[in-house]
């Protein structure tokens, strides 16, 4: 299992009139956390694109348990529970506030696809090689 944590401070523009983080912002929070997870492996989306592979989101689930507010320091835990064996990769996310209260959970499924044709592809070997040790 591969787990990382990323911190994000809620900006005023991300809240609604009720001083609550607008639900649509969680897709961006999850994206930031996923990109940082891959970066912590020493790999980047840019490197994957250079290999001719992109990762579109094909499914996203979110469960809102408690609200986040302006200026909260959010800790987003990103969990990869299994090493992908084909074109599909699934990330679980847990969002905590500074008091370590669980606010939101999410699951995002992406596909590895060939740039240009959007044909399903396997995970790039370079990414597989850095991820594999976490699943042995």
Image (tube, helix red, strand yellow):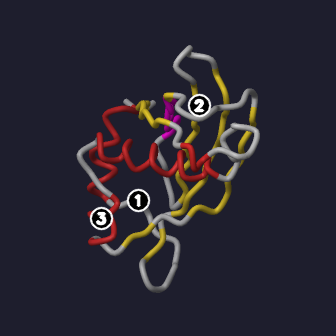
Query: Measuring 42% from the left and 34% from the top, which residue is drawn there?
Result: 6
Q: In this rendering, is residue 4 above or below 39?
A: above
Mark sitting on residue 123: 1
Residue furthest top in the image: 99
- Graded by Cα atoms within 10 Å as few (under 14), some (14 to 19) or many (20 or more), the crowding at tag 2 reads many
What percent of the width, then of the height, locates residue 119? 52, 78
State which mark lies toward you, 1 or 3. Answer: 3
What percent of the width, then of the height, locates residue 117? 48, 85
Q: Is residue 135 left or right of residue 22?
A: left
Is 3 contained in the magenta span?
no
**Label 2–label 1 contact, CB within 8 A:** no
Mark sitting on residue 94: 2
Residue furthest left in the image: 42
Q: Nearer the viewer, residue 100 or 123?
A: 100
- Graded by Cα atoms within 10 Å as few (under 14), some (14 to 19) or many (20 or more), the crowding at tag 3 reads few
**Label 2–label 3 contact, CB within 8 A:** no
Query: Measuring 33% from the left and 70% from the top, which residue is drawn there?
Result: 49
- Graded by Cα atoms within 10 Å as few (under 14), some (14 to 19) or many (20 or more), the crowding at tag 1 reads many
Find disc 3 in the rendering and name its residue. Answer: 46
Q: Is residue 13 left or right of residue 19?
A: left
User: In the rendered image, which quarter contains the N terminus?
Assistant: top left
Precedes in sequence: disc 1 or disc 3: 3
What segment carries the magenta color?
74-82
Query: Measuring 45% from the left and 48% from the top, which residue is drawn there?
Result: 32
| Magenta stretch prevailing secondary structure | strand
Is 79 contained in the magenta span?
yes
């Amino acid at each position: 299992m591969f787990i990382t944590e990323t911190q994000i401070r809620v900006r005023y523009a991300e809240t609604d009139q009720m001083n609550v983080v607008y639900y649509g912002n969680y897709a961006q929070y999850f994206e930031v956390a996923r990109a940082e997870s891959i970066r912590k492996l020493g790999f980047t989306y840019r490197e994957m694109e250079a290999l001719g592979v992109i990762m579109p989101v094909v499914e996203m689930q979110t469960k809102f348990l408690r609200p986040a507010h302006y200026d909260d320091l959010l800790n987003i835990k990103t969990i990869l529970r299994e090493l992908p064996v084909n074109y599909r990769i699934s990330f679980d996310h847990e969002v905590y506030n500074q008091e370590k209260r669980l606010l939101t959970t999410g699951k995002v499924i992406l596909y590895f696809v060939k740039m240009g044709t959007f044909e399903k592809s396997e995970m790039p070997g370079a990414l597989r090689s850095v991820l594999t040790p976490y699943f042995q």
